[in-house]
Image (cartoon, helix red, strand yellow):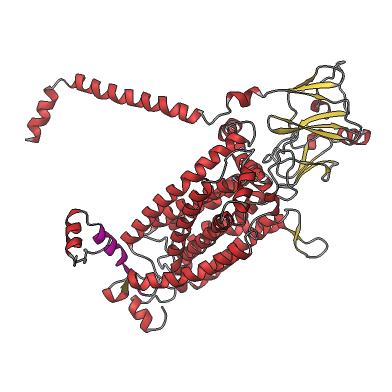
Amino acid sequence: MSGHSTYEPKYAAAKWMDKRLPIIRMGVDFMGFPSPRNLNYWYAFGGILTLCLMSQIITGIILAMHYTPSVEEAFNSVERIKRDVPYGWLLQSMHAVGASMFFLAVYIHMFRGMFYGSYKAPRELLWIIGCLIYLAMMATGFLGYTLPWGQMSFWGATVITGFFGAIPMVGESLQQWLLGGYSVGNPTLQRFFSLHYLLPFIIAALVGLHIWAVHHVGQNNPIGVEPKTKEDTLPFHPFYTMKDAFAIAVFLMIFALFVFYLPDALGHADNYQRANPMVTPPHIVPEWYFLPFYAILRAVPDKLLGIMLMFGAIAVLFVLPWLDTAKVRSLRFRPITRWCFIIFLVMCFVLGWCGANSPDGIAIPMGEHGMSFKWLSRIATLYYFAYFVAILPILGWVEKPKDVPDSITKAIHDGVA
Amino acid sequence: MSDTNTAHDEHDDPSRRDFIYIATGAAAAVGGGAIAWPMAMQMGAAGDTRAAGSIEIDVSKVEEGQQIKVLWRGKPIFVRYRTQREIDIAESVDVSTLRDKQTDDERFVPDFSGKINKNLLVMIGVCTHFGCIPVGEAGDFDGWYCPCHGSHYDSAGRIRKGPAPLNLEIPPYKYISETVIKVG
């Protein structure tokens, strides 16, 4: 926490408490945390994500009361939750849609961090803890998707655990160890359920570290200039609690639209078929939030290389603070990098589009045949990695940034914040 | 002051104290390992899973051009009665051009009479890429096609195109009569 405590207990009970366990002081100091006064709505996603995590944990704990983790009963118990358990349809829908909303929010949060250079010193660890949270979210999302034991659950689990089988020498034994058998089966489902219940609490602990870190180094802001005087900041409460509350209300409207009107829009019809180890669905795809990585996996014809690239696409995020060599944080003042970032954003969507389609399908009709999704995903994969390992390091050296304002307050007065 | 302390410590029978430290540390490490090992190993395939090892398949009912699927260790076994055309295609391939070099003959075990029955192809129906079940009579090579990531297998189940590294696996099996094979 920055600065000294300004809390003055007013009531006798509060004074009594403050001498014994200064928990009110801690809360007041926490909420009064000085925040840059120029934060825009892209900065509301931290609050939105906190809400998402709480919602997932609460609905998840309730669903676990009705769910049966066995290959015989899992599918039926989820259907029972949807049909027979009072308000089960609502809680199940909130949990399943909630996963998508959680990822939507985390992607916006991450892209925001990348645009404003929020990973740069002294916020490298803040960024890395965030990457760890994202990694744990991906694991949790994957494990949770297995639990309804539909066709996509089963085959998704088969493909993902197959990654470990690709490791030379130890792959096959490692895969059997993870699955608890020769193939995905009851032991797999039971351990996935156990771990799916565990991981959100690890995420919650990491979020604790993430918030601790952001309170220690302070929030970045759209111009990427550190607050210098008191007038550059506002107390988090009430200014940003109100701003976040409005953003949360808008976010919840989108959330509710899906929960009540489109509960299956983000899922797959195949998952309403019970898992069948004898038949693979003709077109298997992961949930939308994994599609870009799935496209990277399929972009290369070699199994092991595909897996390495896919994990590399996540690993490269961890070293981003050291790949970006620029001194200026915000891309507002980096005209060339800003365009490269926008192309990067487009390429992420292109990868998602490729991941959703068959590799041999035609993406762009040109001439006699056109470009297949496989080739399009190769181009996008190349750009994805080039952005991190070539564009950012090189532009940091050669690009001439625009003039950066001296302070947040001055930027506001000059109309550039 | 600290100097005298250090000097004092050196006189204080260091070998005995060191022994206690090392012995305590070693006991803790062994104890930690002794509890970590079972906690890790419980993840592996359980005894009942391992025991469900082998099955017998009556192949007499498979007609020419048909394929049956039988579940073995949670994976499907493909038993295909190949047509003469499929055999000819599989034999005509130049083995040196294959990713996983195997002749058509190497995809079989001798039948009950000790000859190779090239009609009856027995394979584990699991794509060697990420474990999906390939679709029969599909793909560019008159064999199998995996819908997950687009691997094409030929009429001997050999990988020809796509990301899979190996041919469809031949399970351990043998003919126990003219018409029955035992897998596993």
Most foreground residue, A20 or B150:
A20
The quadrant of the rendering that contains the C terminus of chain A is bottom left
Residue A32 colored in magenta in the image: yes
Q: Position of residue B122 (x, y in %)?
A: 80, 29
B159 left or right of B24 in image: right
| Region rendered in magenta | A23-37
At 40% from the left and 65% from the top, the residue drawn is A327
Residue A400 colored in magenta in the image: no
Residue A271 sits above or below residue B158 on the image: below
Which residue is outermost to the right? B84
Say if residue B105 shows up in the picture.
Answer: yes
Residue A324 sits above or below residue B115 on the image: below
Most foreground residue, A253 or A266:
A253
> Can you tell which quarter of the image residue B54 is in?
top right
B88 left or right of B13 in image: right
A185 left or right of A56 in image: right
The kind of secondary structure the magenta stretch mainly shows is helix
At 55% from the left and 46% from the top, the residue drawn is A66
